[in-house]
């Protein structure tokens, strides 16, 4: 007895299968129509990280699934862990490695906000810049307050290091990720002494120069840290530094936002 | 035959929320019904339309809003095509996922007219097949066996027997699963071109004109490929039977 065509065709129709329940959610995450969220342990304790196929879309110090879904309009699925390569990339970036690439999903944000955040990414680990510096560097010197607001709205703190932006008077300023205390902890973990920085600021000192090179820097600039005590010269304003014959450092560009600092 | 659950005149349709999953065994096949009618779209018009036409109209207007519906409506068939081409559930899920991501990116670059005029079932099948072909070629290059022999996982991917099916006694279910597994194995031994043609026609249920589009061959050619594929399967099955009988009598 041989099998007839109809039997084969019926057998083939029986081979239709149901997709596994993981398929549709994975597709939606991959194209950026849904997010996943998982916990990541860091220097300031547990962080919650949201991501999708386009990149990291949110970082918070508390489980923010509900608010994230509300902000982005996308469903959020909480999972056990970040993908290994993303967790590794974030760890390396938090460790100061700026070469590691972390894609970000910043849909729904403004050009101005993205300019501010991109500029914050230029600030090296262990250094800080004033809000007015960011405003000047992105060509909007008068938008100091708007820069502060944009940094407060940074959806991916730590990855975009808004903690490295401080008040123009040198005090530490606000921080969206769990308040100013966290900002101190993070800056300290990056090798900056926040107390010393504020003490210096309170004494009115905004810039540090070297009397051998006649170059003037922001106090946290790595070039300023190399100046030995005997050759350190403190300045209260860029005008005074210029009058004394000093030129601004090309790395930290202290003249950016110096008008705001003087005001 | 309209099922009232799927076609309320007004209000949420079969896809009311983001988390709703439809488990249609064969999207758009017999028994699958047209999507919902909403206030915007009177049932009388859309209800008579090809469900994909409605879906494409939605996608043309709002890709992000309609894409989940596309995935839910077509995931079973895309997964089935990949599973029967590759013979391995894990690889099939990856291939189906890649296919939907590719489809999304393509749709994002198409204008509304191009989206509305797509032959959706054939178009998706083409994308899945292309991904499967690449994977098969990569496997061959690595010198790996062309299919998974892991019967455990293969069985797990078979459809659940329908609960109210009166033929489903436990023994019959085991039998049916065993038979399906055997056909699935035989299918993966077919040359890929015949395998693809048989899968699209008889596992997925595409029409010959759709097959011609999906395989980019004249209708006559795809018909011949399907018939040749079925003939090869018959021969393989009969040989398999003979072998089994000989083993039992030996």
Image (cartoon, coloured by chain):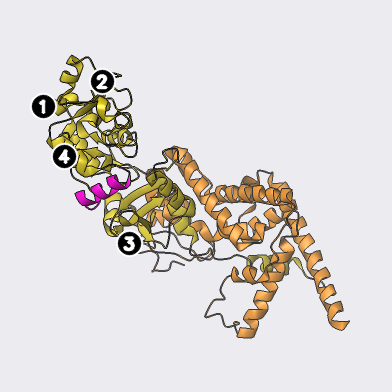
Q: From the viewer's perspective, is the residue at label 2 or at label 4 nearer?
A: 2
Rendering coords of residue A174 (x, y %): 18, 45
Q: Residue at x 24, y 47 (%)?
A: A184
Residue that carries the numbered disc 1 in the rendered image:
A263
Residue that carries the numbered disc 4 in the rendered image:
A199
**The label number, if any, that marks residue A189 in the structure image:** none
- Label 4 lies in what chain? A
Q: CA distance from mark 4 to mark 3?
A: 62 Å
Residue that carries the numbered disc 2 in the rendered image:
A211
Say if B125 sits above or below A235 in the image.
Answer: below
Rendering coords of residue B231 (x, y %): 78, 61
Packing grade of label 4 (10 A; few <14, some 14-19, many >=20) is few
Which residues are the magenta region? A177-191
Residue B79 visible, this orientation: yes
Secondary structure beneath disc 1?
Answer: loop
- Label 3 lies in what chain? B
Rendering coords of residue B151 (x, y %): 67, 70
Q: Is residue A244 part of the magenta span, yes or no?
A: no
Chain that is coloured yellow in the picture: A
Q: CA distance from mark 2 to mark 4?
A: 23 Å
Q: Is residue A181 part of the magenta span, yes or no?
A: yes
Which of the two residues, B119 or A214, is positioned nearer the viewer here? A214
Q: Do dots 4 and 1 share one subunit?
A: yes
Mark closer to the chain start, 2 or 4: 4
């Amino acid at each position: 007895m041989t099998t007839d065509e109809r039997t084969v065709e019926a057998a083939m129709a029986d081979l239709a299968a149901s997709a596994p329940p993981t398929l549709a959610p994975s597709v939606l995450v991959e194209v950026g129509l849904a997010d996943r969220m998982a916990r990541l342990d860091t220097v300031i304790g547990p962080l919650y990280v949201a991501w999708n196929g386009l990149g990291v879309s949110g970082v918070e110090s508390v489980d923010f699934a509900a608010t994230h879904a509300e902000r982005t309009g996308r469903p959020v699925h909480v999972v056990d862990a970040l993908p290994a390569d993303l967790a590794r990339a974030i760890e390396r970036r938090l460790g100061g490695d700026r070469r590691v690439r972390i894609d970000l999903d910043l849909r729904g944000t403004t050009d101005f906000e993205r300019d501010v955040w991109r500029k914050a990414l230029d600030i090296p680990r262990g250094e800080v810049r004033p809000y007015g510096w960011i405003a000047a560097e992105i060509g909007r010197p008068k938008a100091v307050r708007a820069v502060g607001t944009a940094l407060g709205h940074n959806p991916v703190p730590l990855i975009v290091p808004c903690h490295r932006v401080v008040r123009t008077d040198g005090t530490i300023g606000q921080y969206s990720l769990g308040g100013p205390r966290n900002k101190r902890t993070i800056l300290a973990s990056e090798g900056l002494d926040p107390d010393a920085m504020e003490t210096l600021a309170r004494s009115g000192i905004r810039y540090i120069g070297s009397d051998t090179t006649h170059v003037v820097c922001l106090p946290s600039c790595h070039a300023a840290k190399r100046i030995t005590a005997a050759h350190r010269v403190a300045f209260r304003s860029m005008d005074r530094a210029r009058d004394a014959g000093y030129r601004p450092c090309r790395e930290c560009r202290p003249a950016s936002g110096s008008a705001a600092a003087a005001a | 035959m309209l099922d009232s659950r799927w076609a309320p005149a007004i209000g949420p349709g079969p896809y009311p929320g983001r988390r709703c999953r439809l488990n249609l065994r064969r999207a758009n096949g017999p028994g699958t019904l047209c999507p919902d009618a909403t206030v915007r779209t009177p049932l009388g018009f859309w209800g008579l339309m090809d469900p994909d036409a409605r879906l494409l109209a939605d996608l043309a207007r709002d890709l992000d809003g309609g894409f989940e519906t596309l995935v839910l409506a077509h995931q079973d068939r895309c997964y089935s095509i990949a599973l029967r081409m590759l013979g391995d559930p894990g690889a099939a899920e990856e291939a189906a996922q890649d296919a939907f991501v590719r489809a999304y990116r393509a749709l994002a670059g198409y204008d509304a007219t191009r989206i509305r005029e797509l032959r959706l079932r054939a178009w998706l099948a083409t994308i899945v097949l292309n991904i499967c072909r690449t994977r098969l070629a990569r496997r061959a290059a690595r010198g790996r066996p062309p299919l998974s022999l892991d019967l455990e996982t293969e069985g797990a991917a078979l459809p659940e027997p329908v609960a109210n099916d009166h033929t489903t006694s436990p023994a019959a279910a085991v039998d049916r699963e065993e038979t399906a597994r055997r056909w699935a194995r035989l299918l993966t031994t077919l040359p890929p071109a015949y395998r693809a043609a048989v899968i699209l026609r008889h596992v997925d249920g595409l029409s010959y004109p759709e097959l011609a589009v999906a395989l980019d061959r004249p209708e006559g050619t795809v018909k011949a490929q399907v018939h040749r594929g079925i003939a090869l399967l018959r021969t393989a099955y009969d040989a398999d039977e003979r072998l089994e009988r000989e083993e039992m009598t030996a």
